[in-house]
Image (cartoon, rainbow, N blue to C red):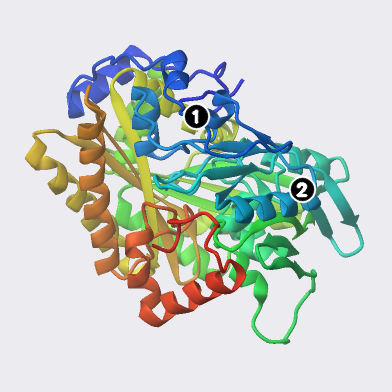
Amino acid sequence: MRRWNGWGDENTKSPFPPSAARYLADLIGKGENIQDASLDDALASVPASRLPDHPLISQDPLERLHHARGQSLPDWAALRHGNIGAFPDGVAFPTDEEQVRTLLDFARQVGSRLIPYGGGTSVVGHINPLDGDAPILTVDLSRQDRLLALDETSHLATFGAGIVGPQLEAQLNQRAFTLGHFPQSFELSTLGGWIATRSSGQQSYHYGRIEDLFAGGRIVTPRGILDMPPLPASAAGPDLRQMILGSEGRLGVITQASIRIRHLPQAEAFYGIFFHDWESGVEAVRQIVQTGVPISMARLSNPRETDTTLKLSGKDNLVTWADRGLRLLAYDQERCLLIYGVTGDVHTTRLARRLTNSMARAHGGLFTGQIIGHTWRKSRFLTPYLRNILWEVGYAVDTLETAVPWSRVLDTERMVQQAMHAALTPTGERALIFAHLSHVYTDGASIYITYIFRRTHDPDKTVERWKAMKTAASQTILAQGGTISHQHGVGLDHAPYLDAEKGALGMDVLREIARTLDPDGIMNPGKLLL
């Protein structure tokens, strides 16, 4: 069963060995176990619905609670302390496009606002109801989860937009195909959510981001159905798919999508390389990418993340021996770990491995084989579960990310972390902050930052600490010319910074598109566009 106040399946637990507790206590202080609000208390806070009865809409308090919040840090603080705020007044589970159309008509007739809901994995407030006089209807697409068409000749598949990652891959794998889109939220997130937020998978360097994979689809808007046929290419004016990508529920409800698929790879493997320092690793990865080496993924952790990953793994004996061996080879406290993947046919993957290892050696890289890469692959979708145990022992965890040109990677990584530390200093608290390059391109890279800090009995104070660091990081990112979001979308948290990236005229264009498709402003208000 899915947790109502945390990440994922409630039966999946992350280990938290005593050594990990000591590591965090030494760096940022001992965490305090703070009692969570109970499910009964949370349910008791659900107000009476303001919606009229409708056969497609449930007003059940538990369903409304499950759809009230996502996975951002403010969401966690609200759920864990029972201070949830606004709830949807009803939740609908349409099974087809006609029911979606009916729900949109109903929302307009009763003056309701409507929030499209995929997997509920948003970390920036995409699905949160806002306080206001109008009732809120959340439309959960989870029952639109079927494979609707498969064109094996053209390598195109059409699915209902509510299908989650594992279901989608399982249905394609049965036919020897894959989409290859593996965000960290893969276990719970949906195809429609990926499109609505411009998601990026961990192996996007090989398979492409969702904008490369989204070939066409259908979206039910308050003005009618927008049908985008899948075409290999077109010069017939602006591409309407680009308008839907990243639209975050402001334009309508995505009901189905056609995606570009591939045959399952013949071979795939993940490997580890240690570098003496961050600068060497960044330069090596840049050259590997710009040379065109056919890797499928490159994830380079900075020294703090490299150390933290090992310390929190729970494999104390293995970590001790690995540390001794690496130090003997002069890979000491500044060492950085690169995990890279190769995917494709046997010849291409062998070539990619040889070229990557050779270029890494030129920058002092130490190839360590498949053990680290294999371990990462097994646990790559389990990492979010660590948030559950860390919260329970007194620590809040959040992430943020950006993308910048290669010429700004080193400065941005350093300056963002410095700004975050400085923002927390007035509170007398410390944070554990670390980073990695999560996605790479010929012209730049995505910098993904994780930060851990102590939470308090007062959820408002915990959120204040988070907001101070988040604001400092966001302002620094903008000053460095980075994007406010490489893969998490805009939602509520990033909306104040969007105009700095799009410009005044660009924001006017986005608002006019929203007004055209949603003239009454019923779709997901407050998200993306303030």
Whether residue 333 is visible? no
Tell me where residue 57 sits by quadrant: top right
Q: Tell me the amino acid under the disc marked 1.
A: Ala
**Front in this rendered view, residue 495 or 112:** 112
> Would you call the spot at circle 2 few (<14 residues within 10 Å), some (14-19), or many (20 or more)?
some
Tell me where residue 241 sits by quadrant: bottom right
Left or right of 292, for residue 503: left
In the image, residue 447 lies at what x, y percent?
38, 55
Q: Which residue is mark 1?
A: 48
Q: Secondary structure at mark 1?
A: loop
- Counting labels gives 2
The label number, if any, that marks residue 439 in the structure image: none
Quarter containing the C terminus: bottom left
Dot 2 or dot 1: first in sequence order is 1
Whether residue 151 is visible? yes
Query: Which residue sits at x=69%, y=49%?
Result: 103
In the image, residue 280 lies at what x, y percent?
34, 56
Query: Which residue sits at x=29%, y=56%?
Result: 413
Quarter containing the N terminus: top right
> Would you call the spot at circle 1 few (<14 residues within 10 Å), some (14-19), or many (20 or more)?
few
In the image, residue 52 lies at what x, y percent?
61, 39
Q: Tell me the amino acid under the disc marked 2.
A: Gln
Query: Which residue sits at x=21%, y=57%?
Result: 415
Q: Which residue is mark 2?
A: 99
Question: Marks 2/1: CA distance?
Answer: 24 Å
Q: Secondary structure at mark 2?
A: helix
